[in-house]
Image (spheres, rainbow, N blue to C red):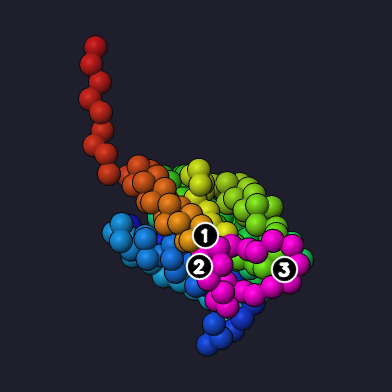
Amino acid sequence: MRAVILSCTLKTSPEASSTEALARVMTAELEKGGASTELIRLVDLNIKPGVKTDQGEGDDWPAVHDKIVDADILVVATPTWLGQQSSVCMRALERMDAMLSETDQDGRGVAMNKVGGVVVTGNEDGAHHIVGTVCQALIDIGFTVPGQSWTYWHLGPGPGPDYLETDRAHDYADRLARNAARNLLAVAKALKPGVFPPQETGD
């Protein structure tokens, strides 16, 4: 079982990211459940604008795309800016649009039998809006999105500290993250070919 986490923080490495910190709570639970995980900080790569899998010379998206296709679980982790997901998150979703026309050897969409989840951070509200927007995009592409396969952290209206700068509300967000990981694993295992033997049919 493989999981890929797309970190859509606007902060380049090695700067600490609150979004990644919460995402790693989820990845720890995924690993506890037997999944291998890889977190990719997209802002460190050259992800060109467009809606093709390969936008030409220097484009780093094709390698990311291949990792998504090879994975069973995809988690999109994004901060909140102006009540919206980050521009990096939007670019990733736009590039994933190409997956709508890609099929596997059996003619099924490449995202079929894969599950998707979401991580959102921000010191103001907007989390539920972002969860809804990102989940809708993942469903359009073909991912299965289990119930409560997301987590978020914020401190309500107005400016305030980031997730890494305070312990406030961590218990709730971290608990949601662990629960989301378990839900993602359960559904991914149910969808994975060969996990359950075929049922014999009687007369």
| Residue type beneath disc 3 | Trp
Mark 3 or 1, which is nearer the eye? Answer: 1
In this rendering, is residue 76 above or below 139? Answer: below
| Residue type beneath disc 2 | Leu
In the shown orientation, is residue 48 left or right of residue 74? right
Quarter that holds the C terminus: top left
In the shown orientation, is residue 198 left or right of residue 177? left
Name the secondary structure under disc 2: helix
Name the secondary structure under disc 3: strand
Question: Contact (CB < 8 A) between labels 2 and 1?
Answer: yes
Q: Earlier in the sequence, mark 2 or mark 3?
A: 2
Question: Contact (CB < 8 A) between labels 3 and 1?
Answer: no
Q: Is residue 169 magenta?
A: yes
How far separated are the C-alphas under marks 3 and 1?
19 Å
Q: What main secondary structure does the magenta stretch of the protein show?
A: loop
How far separated are the C-alphas under marks 2 and 3?
17 Å
Region of the chain picked out in magenta, as a range = 153-170
Rendered image: mark on residue 173: 1
Q: Who's the residue at 57% across and 59% down the image?
A: 152
Q: Residues within 10 Å of mark 2 (few under 14, many from 20)?
A: many
